[in-house]
Amino acid sequence: MNMLPIIKLTIKSAMRSHIFQILLVFLTVLTITLPNILKGDGTVLGFIQISLEYNLYAIMFILTLSTIWLTSFIMTRDMEEYQLHMLVTKPLSRINIWLGKCIGVFSINLVLLCVSLLITYFMVLWKFNNTEYIGTKEDIKAEKIKIEKEVLVSRKVFYPAFKNTKQQALEAFKKDAKNKEMSIDEKEDLIEKYRQDFLAKSAVVNHKDKKTWVFEGLPSKYDGILKLRYKFFVKRVDLQDISNQRETQGILGINVETESKGQTVTNWNTKNVTKIRGAVSHEESLNSAIIKKDNTVEVSFTNLDQKGEPLFFIPKYGPKLLIEVGGFWDNYIRGGIVLTIQLLVLTIVCSTMASFLSMPSAIFTSSVYLFTSYFIPSLISDSRLPIDSVHSIFSWLFEQLMICVTIPITYFDVSSLLANGEIIEFSFIGSIFLKVVVLRALPIMFIGIYIYNKRELGLVIRK
């Protein structure tokens, strides 16, 4: 490979400047100390979840900063120090030079990522096996089983079929307010109001009412334990302040098929659940016999709140069914693959910025781009406003342009999945690779290579 000497030179340069050693020591100290500084809920389960979530966030934050600085330094140094002519006189094309430097930086950060992930993994296992659990032997055994079944595991997730509130809101808008004179902002606000109304109606369970969910596509030959995870909010939904949430009670129902006189009969098996707190995840173990012949599971919840207040079940927080399909290590490897893809995309973007800018400008531009990419998904309207004016056409075109040119970092967030023992599907990894690497990062890379190939600055020999 013609680019191999450039890769080696890039890595040696980072080693000589002690960048690699400094980052390695810093990341090692960070991954060990961070979970012990942060306070969880006082349980080993909480500590392990904090170790996974916060460590992965911190690791990628540091490696993002490292990628921005290192690519800007490596890609611009030959230009700014007028040394590029020494490289291009050798049998190396500018394409090989650009790719060699990009791969070199990626390799350095990939080693740091792997070391950090391994330290985090072994810390989790060490804490699980060597911590001093509090309580009786039965309590300790129950907590260890809970950790093994809820975190140190890989579980496939099934969600119930929910109505599309966005589509409902748009249809209601077309029916009731399409011909009314109003601005674009007023139309968006009205559609959002419709959506919130439909969401509230679909999520609320009033006092003594029963809500039913149907899960589809479950495996017909599964003979293990299913976990039903659900979270609700008492009286109102407030994700910022959950201090007003309290304990309540209700009836959990499972619709089970049985054979009677050659006919299939369905009956509701119920269970009284008490002292279940709002805004907290709850899990119930269910037998695989509840899976019906059509591969569905039907679950219900009856609100028996002591004060007669409504309960809210937000689709994002369940209920959902989880089936164990593998171990924690396999899922952890999948999470590492997603973070590796993120690191590759960061390297490509930052290398492209450094292809035509000076080092300070490249650092600033890369930082602004990544910062903007992080917030773009929340800023773009999700109301699907009808395109019925010039203004709405330009708004739609601008949104599509921003979606195409930005790479939301939230695509790569797998920390919560790992912390909750939920499997990172290969289809999810493939989707990220196609949408982010193939359709966005590669075009950006070609632009960077083209600019670097055409750039003349730095070819002049300094006298």
Image (cartoon, rainbow, N blue to C red):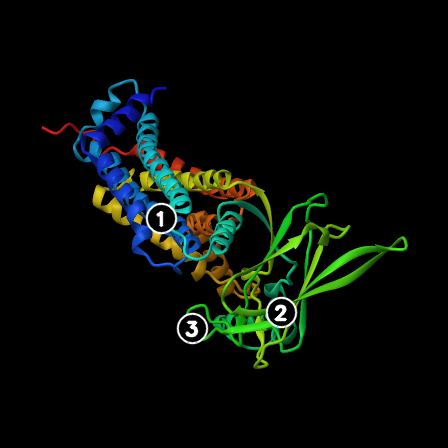
- Residue at 78% x, 62% y: name it: 267
In the image, is 73 to the left or to the right of 202?
left
**Element type where label 2 sits in the image:** helix
Which kind of residue does numbered mark 2 sit on? Ser
Q: Is residue 198 visible?
A: no
Q: CA distance from mark 2 to mark 1?
A: 36 Å
N-terminal of the pair, mark 1 or mark 3, is 1
According to the picture, the residue beneath numbered tag 1 turns out to be 55
- Residue at 61% x, 75% y: name it: 179
N-terminal of the pair, mark 2 or mark 3, is 2
Tell me where residue 209 appears, x and y as whole percent: 67, 75
Q: Measured along the vertical axis of the image, is residue 143 above or below residue 345?
A: below
- Residue at 52% x, 72% y: name it: 247
Between disc 2 and disc 1, the foreground one is 1
In the image shown, does 103 or 219 lie closer to the viewer? 219
According to the picture, the residue beneath numbered tag 2 turns out to be 202
In the image shown, does 190 or 5 lie closer to the viewer? 5
Mark 1 residue crowding within 10 angstroms, few (<14) / some (14–19) / many (20+): many
According to the picture, the residue beneath numbered tag 3 turns out to be 243
**Element type where label 1 sits in the image:** helix
**Element type where label 3 sits in the image:** loop
Which kind of residue does numbered mark 1 sit on? Asn
Q: CA distance from mark 2 to mark 3?
A: 24 Å
